Image (tube, grey):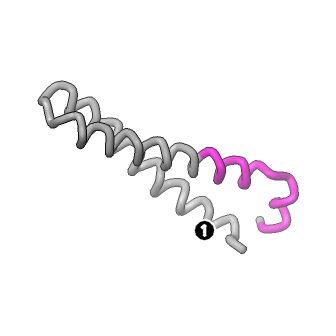
């Protein structure tokens, strides 16, 4: 079972990666990098976003308050 600190660290790392991908995708549209690469980055960004949402739900779970 993950503790709260571990979840918070993972959340921050994922948020940073999500932002990096977002910036790379925007640059990809500006400086054509190819549909395959853009699709790969978008898929990774979506998976990361899903994990971010899941972690945020865990951190906001009242039963998790015992881990504080």
Picture coordinates of residue 32, whole percent (x, y): 13, 30
Give the SS element for disc 1.
helix
What residue appears at the point 68 percent right and 71 percent down from the top-left corner?
2
Instruction: Indicate yes or no whether the magenta region holds residue 66.
Output: yes
Determine which quarter of the picture holds residue 24. Answer: top left
Nearer the observer, 22 or 42? 42
Within-10-Å neighbours for mark 1: few <14, some 14–19, many 20+: few
Q: Give above or below for 67 relative to 28.
A: below
- Judging by the rendered image, the residue that carries numbered circle 1 is 6
What residue appears at the point 24 percent right and 42 percent down from the top-left corner?
37
The span shown in magenta is 53-67
Quarter of the rendering occupied by the C terminus: bottom right
Nearer the observer, 28 or 8? 28
What residue appears at the point 23 percent right and 34 percent down from the top-left corner?
35
Quarter of the rendering occupied by the N terminus: bottom right
Instruction: Indicate yes or no whether the magenta region holds residue 15.
Output: no
Determine whether, in the image, residue 56 is placed left or right of residue 64: left
Picture coordinates of residue 34, whole percent (x, y): 17, 35
Determine which quarter of the picture holds residue 33. Answer: top left
Q: Main secondary structure of the magenta part?
A: helix
Determine whether, in the image, residue 15 is placed left or right of residue 4: left
Q: Give above or below for 3 relative to 16.
A: below
């Amino acid at each position: 079972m993950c503790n709260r600190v571990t979840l918070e660290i993972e959340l921050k790392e994922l948020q940073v990666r999500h932002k990096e991908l977002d910036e790379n995708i925007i640059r990809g549209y500006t400086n054509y990098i190819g549909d395959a690469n853009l699709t790969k980055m978008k898929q990774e960004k979506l998976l990361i976003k899903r994990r971010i949402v899941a972690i945020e739900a865990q951190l906001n779970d009242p039963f998790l308050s015992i881990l504080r």
